[in-house]
Image (spheres, rainbow, N blue to C red):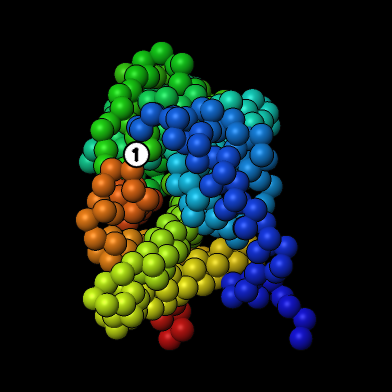
Amino acid sequence: MEKGPAMTAFSLEPAQLAWCAELRTLAAERLRPLAGKGEPGRVNRALLAELGGLGLLGRLFSSGALDLCLMRESLAHGCTEAETALALQGLGAHPVHAHGTGSQRARWLPRVADGTAVAAFALSEPGAGSDAAALALRAEGDGPGHWRLTGRKCWISNAPEADFYTVFARTAPGAGARGVTAFLVPADRPGLTGTGLDMLSPHPIGALDFDAVPVTADDVLGEVDRGFRVAMGTLNLFRPSVGAFAVGMARAALDATLAHTAGRDAFGGKLRDLQTVAHTVAEMALRTEAARLMVYAAATAYDTGAPDVPQRAAMAKLLATETAQYVVDSAVQLHGAGALQRGHLLEHLYREVRAPRIYEGASEVQRGIIAKELYAAHQEAR
């Protein structure tokens, strides 16, 4: 039987498996040392340059959702900082790749690909996190084809150190999702300032303040008042890959637990000989594999243009991030107090694993999307 595109939802080709193994080795041997030299909460430009030199950032714009998931999962297994640096470049620059003008793409995408320009996706606000359609950053008209951005963005990854931001602002008051426009805003625009936020997760996150920041029609990504499509299209691509990031962390925690429980003496035998331990490890593996398969299925649906991408993307992110939380927590429990020491792999993963259940749509938002899509399909079938 000839394999079709959908087969990659359940199994990978030998070349893909070899590439993933190569990425895991690169992450552990070349990227992790660079990550260790970085400052928590700050952009690691040396790490970005290495990702660019390896050609991984360029692949963000030349391959599909499954390829993105494989990169994120494999890098996360060996170096979560490298995974996150790559993902944030993709999230911030994808709207430029998909909706930018020729001049916008020519100016920014080569620099994103080689790691010399840092990108950021500026959607969330203090009063509009999960409810992205409620954003209040104002784009007030300042003559034909000119606006001034006024307001605040919060919890923006790579802020305030990014070189440019994909910013979503309200151009039509009271219009909900229909009145949002996406703008490409270079960091040096007058009136744009930012501050870093001290967060549990170690990657850079900050807030941005817009004090009548000037933008023009040349800065628009896509169409005026159609920016919500830009945001949702980007999230539909990246949500499954957030799940891939989670699967990579879960797999790293599982591998560490297998090694620990197989070698640790306890109660006259090895820790793995205790049925409760063995059953917990089996459950960790079961959930991780189920999440991996759903992530690959969602990515394949995106790459093949399936009509149910929003539902599949939401399911993949929800299952994988909730699974990773369980697996990492179980790994910490089976390791004991040593896993809580600063510098331990599981201590690091324990801090990393919490945020993905919130960003790019909290778990509750994903459940809402799934239910909405299910009822819409039910209504169409009647």
What residue is at 24 percent from the left and 76 percent from the top?
267
Please state the horizontal and vertical placement of residue 23, each as a whole percent of the image. Answer: 61, 51
Q: Which residue is mark 1?
A: 202
Please state the horizontal and vertical placement of residue 64, each as a whole percent of the image. Answer: 64, 55
What residue is at 51 percent from the left and 27 percent from the top?
45
Q: Is residue 340 left or right of residue 164?
A: left
Q: Is residue 328 left or right of residue 231?
A: left
Q: Nearer the viewer, residue 186 or 99?
A: 186
What residue is at 31 percent from the left and 27 percent from the top?
196
Picture layout, residue 221 above or below residue 361: above
Q: Nearer the viewer, residue 140 or 203?
A: 203
Please state the horizontal and vertical placement of residue 302, each as a whole percent of the image. Answer: 58, 63
Residue lying furthest top = 190
Q: Nearer the viewer, residue 239 or 328?
A: 328
Please state the horizontal and vertical placement of residue 139, each as a whole percent of the image. Answer: 37, 29
Answer whether residue 213 is visible to the viewer in this image: yes
What residue is at 27 percent from the left and 31 percent from the top?
197
Q: Is residue 6 left or right of residue 272?
A: right
Q: Amino acid at mark 1?
A: Pro
Pick the quarter of the image with the C terminus: bottom left
Picture layout, residue 150 above or below residue 342: above
Q: Nearer the viewer, residue 3 or 202?
A: 202
Q: Quadrant of residue 56?
A: top right
Q: Residues within 10 Å of mark 1 (few under 14, many from 20)?
A: some
Determine whether the residue tagged by mark 1 lies in a helix, strand or loop: loop
